[in-house]
Image (spheres, rainbow, N blue to C red):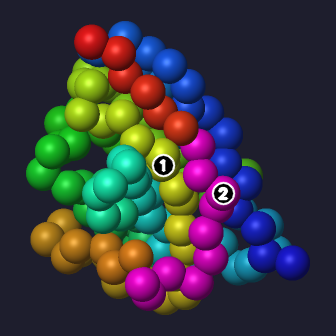
Amino acid sequence: EVQLVQSGGGLVQAGGSLRLSCVASEFTFDEYAITWFRQDSGKEREGVSSISNGDGSTYYVDSVKGRFTISSDHAKKTVYLQMDSLKPEDTAVYYCAARLFGTVLPDLKPDPYRQDYWGKGTLVTVSS
């Protein structure tokens, strides 16, 4: 059974850092693009950052550029989202998602309706 198991998240003060992890099981890791989405109550799910495990290309939404870093450890089948200089507006439930042969480009906004698998989500709360 394909699973994306998330960890990390929690409560942090503004300016602080957190790291999210997404461990994939039961699929060929290199064939998938992994995206971190986030959703705050009453808002649409937003693609925050993506990485192609095939060619390493990445995407970041403008609001996190320079603050968040996505990376991938193929041996551990894990994708990380390092979040620095956190702001209260980063508060949301964060989800990792996988798309088979997904295309990742710096200006290509991830589509939440085209993902094949989802993690269960983890809450990130940034206090002011």
Q: What percent of the width, then of the height, locates residue 4?
A: 70, 62
Q: Quadrant of residue 35?
A: bottom left
Residue numbers of the magenta segment: 113-122
Can you name the residue that lies furthest to the front here?
42
Quarter in which the N terminus is drawn? bottom right
Q: CA distance from mark 2 to mark 1?
A: 9 Å
Q: In the rendered structure, find residue 12 and report the number of the disc placed on it.
A: none
Q: Which residue is found at the position 20% from the left and 76% from the top?
A: 108
Q: Is residue 16 visible?
A: no
Magenta stretch: residue 47 in it? no
Q: Which residue in the protein does label 1 denote?
A: 94
Magenta stretch: residue 119 in it? yes
Q: What percent of the width, then of the height, locates residue 77?
A: 69, 59
Q: Nearer the viewer, residue 26 or 127?
A: 127
Q: What percent of the width, then of the height, locates residue 25?
A: 79, 67
Q: What percent of the width, then of the height, locates residue 26?
A: 82, 75
Q: Secondary structure at mark 2?
A: loop
Can you name the residue that lies furthest to the right here?
1
Vertical side of 32 occupied by 13: above or below: above
Q: Is residue 84 left or right of residue 82?
A: left
